[in-house]
Image (spheres, helix red, strand yellow):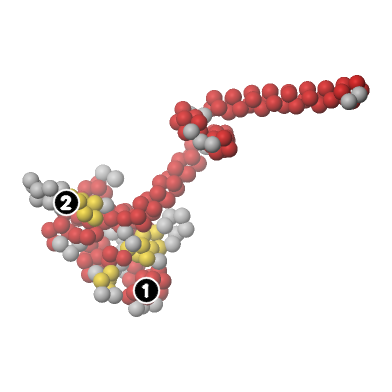
Amino acid sequence: MTTVAHEALHPVTARIEAAKAALRERFEEHLARASAAVVLKAVALADEKAFAALAKVDVEAKRSVETRNQEAVARMKSRAFDRVASRCELLDAKAAHEILGITKQALSQKTKAGNLLAYTNSGNRRKFYPSFQFAENKPKAVVASLIRALDVDPADTEAMNFLVQHLVGRMDYSDPGEPSNEVSRFELLDDSEALEIIKRDYRNALAVGQ
């Protein structure tokens, strides 16, 4: 390499080194904004995933508190749907109206009338029908009775979702002194004594906003 060519590279090298220094400084500032939880999580990840996790910090910092709160609620609702789906079989509208031998329109009418439980996925607004409410290709009568007894508005998707979440939860249905016998509440709908406990627990949970 000639002396002239060698000297010509110096400005380029200087600019690269200056750019690296600027990037390091920006990264340090970015890292300083990250919470301890984010840093500890990122350090355990592979390099590219760690950098991606830290990159989100700046984006989130620019969002308003209201926006971040709304995002948190959306994530919570998504997790709620996944939790329900993991605890009971959820049928889509097509499967539900085929099981009942009715049209999709008739299924919708039964739902609006409070004769069926429907869980609405807040992400895409699709309705799903817990399979535990069907027997012998018919809706269980206890479901409509329960919806009315608890004064749940079928048009209120949040209220209906709350009821389904309650029913897929587990309860200890054992007598005092006996070993714990935890079962899903929906498994006890045909037990009149258990049904009264389910209603009581629902009202108590609703009262405290759980």
Q: CA distance from mark 2 to mark 1?
A: 34 Å
In this rendering, the answer to whether 14 lies above or below 102 is above
Let me know if residue 118 appears in the view: no
Residue 66 at x, y percent in the picture: 48, 39
Q: Locate the N terminus and report the quarter of the image it occupies.
A: top right
In this rendering, the answer to whether 195 lies above or below 47 is below
In this rendering, the answer to whether 108 lies above or below 87 is below
Q: Nearer the viewer, residue 210 or 7?
A: 7
Residue 97, numbered circle: 1
Q: Dot 2, how many residues are within 10 Å of its Cα: few (below 14), some (14-19), or many (20+)?
A: few
Please report the residue visible at 39 percent of the width from the left and 77 percent of the height from the top.
103
Please report the residue visible at 40 percent of the width from the left and 74 percent of the height from the top.
104
Residue 119, numbered circle: none
Residue 116 at x, y percent in the picture: 30, 67
Residue 93 at x, y percent in the picture: 40, 69
Q: Locate the C terminus and report the quarter of the image it occupies.
A: top left
Q: Among all residues in the image, which is located at the extreme left?
A: 177
Answer yes or no: do the residues labelled 2 and 1 have beta carbons within 8 Å?
Answer: no
Amino acid at the residue labelled 2: Asn
Label 2 element class: loop
Residue 187 at x, y percent in the picture: 22, 60
Q: Dot 1, how many residues are within 10 Å of its Cα: few (below 14), some (14-19), or many (20+)?
A: some
Amino acid at the residue labelled 1: His
Mark 2 = which residue? 181
Please report the residue visible at 16 percent of the width from the left and 51 percent of the height from the top.
181
